[in-house]
Image: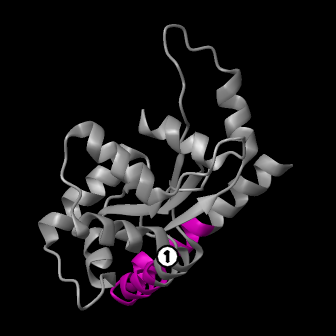
Amino acid sequence: MCTERMKEAITDGSKKKENARDILARFMSEQGMRKTPERFAILDVVMQMKGHHSADEILTMMPQDFPVSRGTIYSTLTLLVECGLAYNHQTEGATLYECAFGKQPHHHYICTGCHKIWDLQDSTIEQAVSKMKTPRFKKLRCSTYIYGLCNICQAKLARVKKKMEKQKEASMTREERRFARINEELAKAAEWFKEN
């Protein structure tokens, strides 16, 4: 499989290191696919990119003198994922791609507010997975996604909640405000009794 070849290419041994173009060329030959300049140009862009990008972002990174269609971008990105040269990450907003060549599998934080992805390097996850018994199943790699809100989206959410509370309070009658204060005082008292 191509990902196994990629692992061999990453490790230093007596073999000559294989580059990404060689891996892609061999994979396309084995699959009976044409080796087009467009596919190699897209591979070059993916190999140079930092971080996680959508197919449309990758399309805008293509050299101006080398136009490719959106369909070619999508089919080539799928090919690169199958070959093990790129990772794809499904978010609620879009599929994002990341260069996999020369990188160890790693984990990610995904913000459900802005859909940004951050790499997470944590060896305890790999250690836990390696200790797991998986009868009749060979583990190849592990990828974990931790979903939540980044600090920027948390701050935005807090501002929106505060604004909504102010609007709600402004529209309350005098009696409703009085009962809301009583409710807050009762909640504080209940919290105090729990602690003591």
Q: Quadrant of residue 61?
A: bottom left
89 or 189: nearer the viewer: 89
Given residues 106 and 91, the one toward you in this image is 106
Residue type indicated by callout 1: Cys
Q: Residue at 72% across / 59% down in the picture?
A: 189
Going by the image, does 176 lie left or right of 192?
A: left
Is 130 placed left or right of 44 in the picture?
A: right
In the rendered image, the vertical position of residue 53 relative to residue 83, given as above or below = below
**In percent of the image, x 18 and y 53: which residue is there?**
34
Question: Residue 84, image x and y in percent?
Answer: 43, 47
The image quadrant of residue 150 is bottom right
Residue at image x 17%, y 76%?
A: 68
Query: Circle 1 sits in a helix, a strand or a loop, which is it?
Result: helix
Residue of label 1: 153
Say which of 109 and 154 sits in front: 109
Say whether residue 118 is magenta.
Answer: no
Q: Position of residue 175 (x, y in %)?
A: 41, 79
Q: Is the residue 29 above or below the residue 146 in the image? A: above
Is 72 located above or below residue 58 in the figure?
Answer: above
Instruction: Verify whether residue 161 appears in magenta.
Output: yes
Q: Which residues are magenta?
A: 160-184
Indicate the position of residue 88 as horizontal and vertical percent values.
38, 54
In the image, residue 152 above or below residue 125: below
Residue in view at x 29 percent, y 37 percent: 30
Res. 88 in view: yes
Please, what is the dominant secondary structure of the magenta stretch? helix
